[in-house]
Amino acid sequence: MKMKITFIRPHISHVPAADAMEPLVFAMLSSYLPNTIDVELYDDRIETVPIDLETDLVAMTVETYTAKRAYSFADEFRSRGIPVIMGGYHPTFLPDEALEHADAVVVGDSEDIWLSIIADFEKDQLKKIYRSTNTQSLKNISPDRDLFNNKKYSPISLVQYGRGCQYACDFCSIYSFYGNKNLRQRPIVDVVREIESLDKKHVFIVDDNLFIDREKTMKFIEALVPLNIKWSCQASIDIGADSEMLNLMQKSGCFNALIGFESLNPKNLSQMHKKWNMKFGGFNDVVKRIHDNGILIYATFIFGYDNDTPASFESTLDFALENQFFLANFNPLTPMPGATLYSRLKNENRLLFDKWWLDPGFKYGDATFLPKNMTPDELKDGCFSIRKEFNTYSNIFKRAINMKTNSQSLYHLGMYTLANLVNRKELYNKQAVALG
């Protein structure tokens, strides 16, 4: 009888998501398995995860926001005699916590040890912790997308080119996960072959920062030109100072880039170790250069650093509306395990929760620490207020008429409209929802 592995992607709560994208990690892991093993995927964001699973092993990827729900699932499965393995950012930084609910935890990336884990499981010799070196070559990756058949994901395919980011921002745990010595890229020919095999012609390059190596990135983007696709990515703001890069991005079909502006206050940028955000000219100039190349911007901002006041919300909203961003997110600063920020706020005795991700009193959107120049409620309410204002129907319409970007073609206008309506729905679906 064939062995069976069930992959589970937990959600933050019981409320279905309207913006779920394919969980690429499971397609990658599935591709390494021999055909003597059956696999299935349940994505908690878009479907019900059956508790009465008939499977030999459950494997979960766990984020900090999904930890509480993941642990609940795992406890139930283990009570029924089904072993559970957990991986991802959260178990990597808090393996002992995860092991209270799992039989084994993967620390770091899993490709280089995945088959060893399965071999140990088959021999009934599963270890508690498996540690990756995060140095595995990214050659010959061929994700098994059959896992996604008949599942209602967004109409965009996810593709990975490289891993890691060279910047060590105070609030981000990516640098802690990879460091600056394990920045790796796949062979360009492999990525091109994968994109050519997709049935969706809008691709999201999921790299945390696609532009960590300019020379390699230029070659990669050049290879996208003949594919006749639209593509999106996450980028650092320095692309706005590189006219050659921007021209090539436009030529190759770049649709939009998610850029972390984070704050309009230089002192905040300095505190978050992102002062370099200001070295490429004023934000308005950077935005103009990107928009002049027809590239839409998904802008993200965070509030709660020591130089933020209640007045910071309105000025940031004005900036976002004036620049007619494709999308924008306004988030309360949240200390994540593994990030420098978490340790700093803990040492300063400013955390409101010992572990906010498990605390029954925490709800999505709540402040998790004591800001310097506003109350926790002012931080929570200020973020939600400008989220709502940016996403009013009237403001969605006003931003839609930007002929350089949001409505430069019928395709752009259609994607803009769909993305904004989904984003507006998720805004109200998540706010004040208890995790788990």
Image (cartoon, helix red, strand yellow):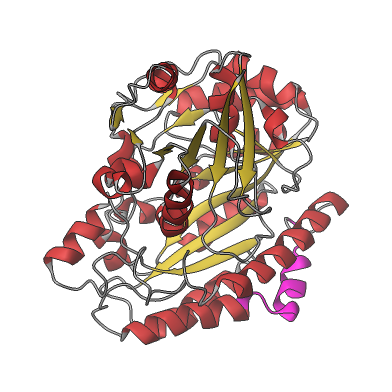
Determine whether, in the image, residue 82 is placed left or right of residue 190. Answer: left
Return the x and y of residue 50 as percentages of the image width and height: 63, 49
Q: Quadrant of residue 228?
A: top right
Q: Position of residue 262 (x, y in %)?
A: 42, 62
Task: From this view, report whether residue 75 is shown above or below residue 388.
Answer: above
Residue 26 is situated, as x and y percent measured from the top left of the image, at 56, 33
Residue 332 inside the magenta-drawn segment: no
In the foreground, 327 or 156: 156
Is residue 356 among what the camera can see? yes
Write down the region rendered in magenta.
390-404
The number of discs equals 0
Q: Is residue 322 among the parts visible in the rendering? A: no
Quick one: 215 or 379, which is closer to the camera? Answer: 379
Q: Whole-percent x and y of residue 201? A: 78, 35
Vertical order, 146 against 387 (above or below): above
**For the N terminus, which image quadrant?**
top right
Q: Is 402 contained in the magenta span? A: yes
Magenta part, dominant SS? helix
The residue at 47%/38% (across/down) is 82
